[in-house]
């Protein structure tokens, strides 16, 4: 699991977007960009939940396109990586991720992820780096756990991310 590579590639992608974009981040405002990243992470997480329909207890799960699921999952991971780069949480490693307890209850996992997103945002606003880092590690671990609950192996996600982002950006 080469997390450092994912962080580096996400940083390169974002720098390319900034260079190609006419949007001046100073005009948009740092507080708006902060809120946008967290809102985007929440929305992308919600899209995964919506795709799986796991919140509809009365509905039988349909077969979900594996590629569609991977794409939605990676869309969320990109914002998680972006937040990690912005706040210097990109120092995390596999050992830190593996130390977090896993769950096989997808409903509780989604709920915990939303709670972690809120808690991370609050800890960053309070300028509490250590607590922010600990929450970020837990959030990242839960995202990996979520992927596993959805039948996605992290190596598969990693390879898909690398293939689709390195080829487009080389």
Image (spheres, rainbow, N blue to C red):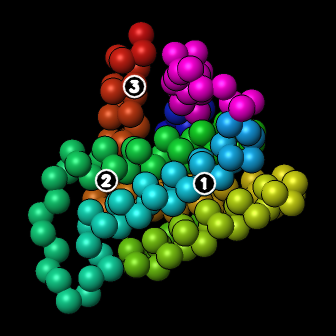
Residue lying at 50% horizontally and 76% vertically, measured from the top left: 111
Q: Which residue is mark 3?
A: 165
Q: Which residue is mark 1?
A: 38
Which residue occupies the foreground of this view, 9 or 44? Answer: 44
Q: Secondary structure at mark 1?
A: helix
58 is higher (above) or lower (below) than 91:
below
For label 3, the crowd category at 10 Å Cα-Cα, with few meaning under 14, some 14 to 19 and many 20 or more, is: some
Q: Is residue 141 visible?
A: no
Q: Are marks 2 and 1 in contact (CB under 8 Å)?
A: no
How far across and how far down the image is residue 64, in percent?
A: 17, 59
C-alpha separation, residue under disc 3 versus residue under disc 2: 19 Å
2 is higher (above) or lower (below) than 72:
above
Residue lying at 47% horizontally and 73% vertically, measured from the top left: 109
Which residue occupies the foreground of this view, 6 or 56? Answer: 56
C-alpha separation, residue under disc 3 versus residue under disc 1: 22 Å
Q: Is residue 19 magenta?
A: yes
Q: Residue furthest top?
A: 170
Q: Is residue 112 visible?
A: yes
The residue mark sitting in front, 3 or 2, is 3
Q: Are marks 3 and 2 in contact (CB under 8 Å)?
A: no
Q: Secondary structure at mark 2?
A: loop
Residue lying at 46% horizontally and 79% vertically, measured from the top left: 108
Q: Which residue is mark 2?
A: 152
| Mark 3 or mark 2: whose residue is earlier in sequence | 2
C-alpha separation, residue under disc 2 versus residue under disc 1: 24 Å
For label 2, the crowd category at 10 Å Cα-Cα, with few meaning under 14, some 14 to 19 and many 20 or more, is: some
Q: Secondary structure at mark 3?
A: helix
For label 1, the crowd category at 10 Å Cα-Cα, with few meaning under 14, some 14 to 19 and many 20 or more, is: some
- Give the magenta range: 7-27
- Place residue 45 in its image quadrant: bottom left
């Amino acid at each position: 699991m080469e997390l450092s590579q994912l962080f580096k590639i996400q940083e390169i992608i974002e720098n390319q977007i900034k260079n190609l974009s006419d949007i001046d981040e100073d005009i948009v405002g740092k507080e708006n960009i902060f809120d946008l990243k967290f809102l985007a992470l929440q929305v992308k997480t919600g899209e995964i939940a919506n795709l799986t329909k796991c919140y509809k207890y009365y509905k039988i799960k349909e077969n979900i396109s594996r590629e569609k699921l991977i794409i939605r999952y990676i869309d969320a991971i990109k914002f998680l990586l972006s937040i990690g780069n912005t706040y210097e949480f990109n120092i995390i490693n596999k050992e830190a991720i593996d130390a977090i307890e896993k769950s096989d209850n997808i409903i509780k996992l989604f709920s915990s992820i939303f709670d972690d997103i809120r808690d991370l945002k609050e800890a960053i606003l309070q300028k509490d780096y250590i607590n922010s880092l600990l929450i970020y590690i837990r959030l990242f671990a839960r995202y990996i756990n979520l992927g596993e609950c959805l039948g996605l192996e992290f190596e598969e996600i990693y390879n898909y991310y690398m293939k689709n982002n390195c080829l487009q950006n080389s």
